[in-house]
Amino acid sequence: MDDIFVGRLMSSPVTTVAADASAESVAEQLLDEGISSVVVVDDENRIEGILTSTDFVRIAAQGGRPSAVTVADHMTTDVVTTSVNESIERVADLMIEEGIHHVPVVDDTEGVVGIITTTDLTAYLSGIEEPSPARVAN
């Protein structure tokens, strides 16, 4: 697996949202698109955070209402990222070490260019290399 790189398996384009988006609208977007995370970016496509379905579980467990909060209120801002040229083995190790399932793929000039998830890695290992259309954001 050393010779397989993130750029080959990542989902792209990735669904992005602004930090001031309502958590409720993003929750609906996750359901509509059949995805489990969105990357939060600024006006220049630079990563600001990530919001995952796990964050929505946390919101519900704390008695919060997604209609009353923004993405910025619950996004993770210390985001683990990777590049298109990183080996998938290294990214898989990172996911295990950090206990995460989504790693945004960034480029120094373009900002966020994709995302690699445990689903992408599982699809590759099972012999299905192409991501399903439901997971690829428009």
Image: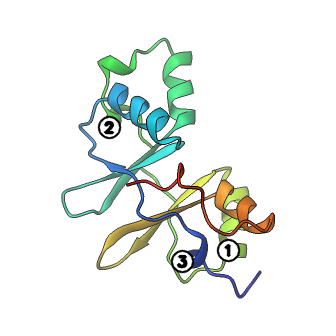
- Mark 2 and mark 1 in contact? Answer it, CB < 8 Å: no
Identify whether 84 is placed above or below 62: below
Q: Which residue does the numbered mark 3 point to in the structure image?
A: 7
Q: Amino acid at mark 2?
A: Ala
Gap between marks 3 and 2, in whole Å? 28 Å
| Residue at image coords 74%, 59% | 122
Give the mark nearer the N terminus: 3 vs 2.
3
**Residue 116 horizontal side relative to residue 90, left or right:** left
- Mark 3 and mark 2 in contact? Answer it, CB < 8 Å: no
Instruction: Depth check: give the residue in front, 101 or 11.
Output: 11
Q: Residues within 10 Å of mark 1 (few under 14, many from 20)?
A: many
Gap between marks 2 and 1, in whole Å? 29 Å
Give the mark nearer the N terminus: 2 vs 1.
2
Q: Which residue does the numbered mark 2 point to in the structure image?
A: 72
Q: Residues within 10 Å of mark 2 (few under 14, many from 20)?
A: some
Instruction: Depth check: give the residue in front, 133 or 45.
Output: 133
Gap between marks 3 and 1, in whole Å? 9 Å
Identify whether 95 is placed above or below 83: above
Q: Which residue does the numbered mark 1 point to in the structure image?
A: 88
**Residue 50 x, y percent position in the rendering:** 44, 48
